[in-house]
Image (cartoon, rainbow, N blue to C red):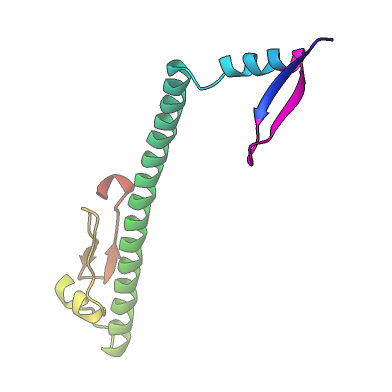
């Protein structure tokens, strides 16, 4: 095994001689050649991140639509309850219009989906048939 002598100047003006095995010198030369990433590797990583981001965005948008639909369904349920309470307090008389039902609910219903509930004045039935496709 051959060893190489290397002179190193140390702080304070002293000179030290170190013996380095030849095999170690070859390894450091090999590692020097393996530094960094190639452009192709970088492009593959960027493509994978873009695919994951595209999937996450579509899932997030679907969650927002579901939340808007759930909020609308909750408001329709509040309106149904208001109609039932009105019916009980007014001796079996239903509210005369959807606008009068809206005044019974506090805060006033604000529907986010395109399909809003339909109120039938003859029997007091409130139907809400909105789907995820109706929500922006």
Residue 55 within the magenta-colored segment of the rendering: no
Vertical side of 25 occupied by 114: above or below: below
Residue 92 placement: quadrant: bottom left
Q: Give the image location of residue 53, x and y in percent.
A: 40, 36
Q: Give the image location of residue 102, x and y in percent.
A: 20, 75
Residue drawn at (32%, 72%) of the image:
80
Q: In the current view of this chain or complex, which residue is farthest to the top?
A: 1
Q: Give 111 or 31, whichever is nearer the viewer.
A: 31
Q: In the current view of this chain or complex, which residue is farthest to the right?
A: 1
Vertical side of 21 occupied by 53: above or below: below
Residue 97 placement: quadrant: bottom left
Can residue 97 be seen in this snapshot?
no
Q: Is residue 102 left or right of residue 19?
A: left
Vertical side of 2 occupied by 120: above or below: below
Q: Is residue 90 left or right of residue 73?
A: left
Residue 10 within the magenta-colored segment of the rendering: yes
Residue drawn at (69%, 12%) of the image:
26
Q: In the current view of this chain or complex, which residue is farthest to the front?
A: 13
Part of the protein shown in magenta: 9-24
Can residue 9 be seen in this snapshot?
yes
Residue drawn at (70%, 16%) of the image:
25
Q: Is residue 64 left or right of residue 6?
A: left
Residue drawn at (30%, 62%) of the image:
72
Identify the image quadrant of the N terminus. top right
Vertical side of 93 occupied by 55: above or below: above
Q: Give the image location of residue 67, x and y in percent.
A: 36, 56
Q: Give the image location of residue 49, x and y in percent.
A: 44, 32
Q: Give 88 or 43, whichever is nearer the viewer.
A: 43
Q: Give 32 or 104, whichever is nearer the viewer.
A: 32
């Amino acid at each position: 095994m051959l060893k190489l002598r290397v002179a190193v100047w140390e702080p304070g003006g002293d000179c030290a001689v170190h013996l380095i095995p030849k095999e170690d010198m070859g390894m450091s030369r090999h590692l020097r050649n393996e530094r960094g990433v190639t452009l192709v590797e970088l492009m593959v990583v960027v493509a994978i991140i873009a695919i994951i981001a595209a999937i996450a965005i579509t899932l997030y948008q679907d969650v927002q639509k579901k939340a808007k639909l759930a909020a609308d369904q909750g408001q329709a349920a509040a309106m149904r309850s208001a109609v039932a309470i009105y019916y009980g307090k007014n001796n079996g008389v239903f509210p005369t219009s959807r606008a009068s039902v809206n005044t019974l609910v506090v805060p006033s219903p604000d529907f986010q989906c395109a399909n809003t509930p339909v109120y039938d004045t003859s029997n007091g039935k409130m139907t809400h048939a909105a789907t995820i496709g109706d929500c922006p």
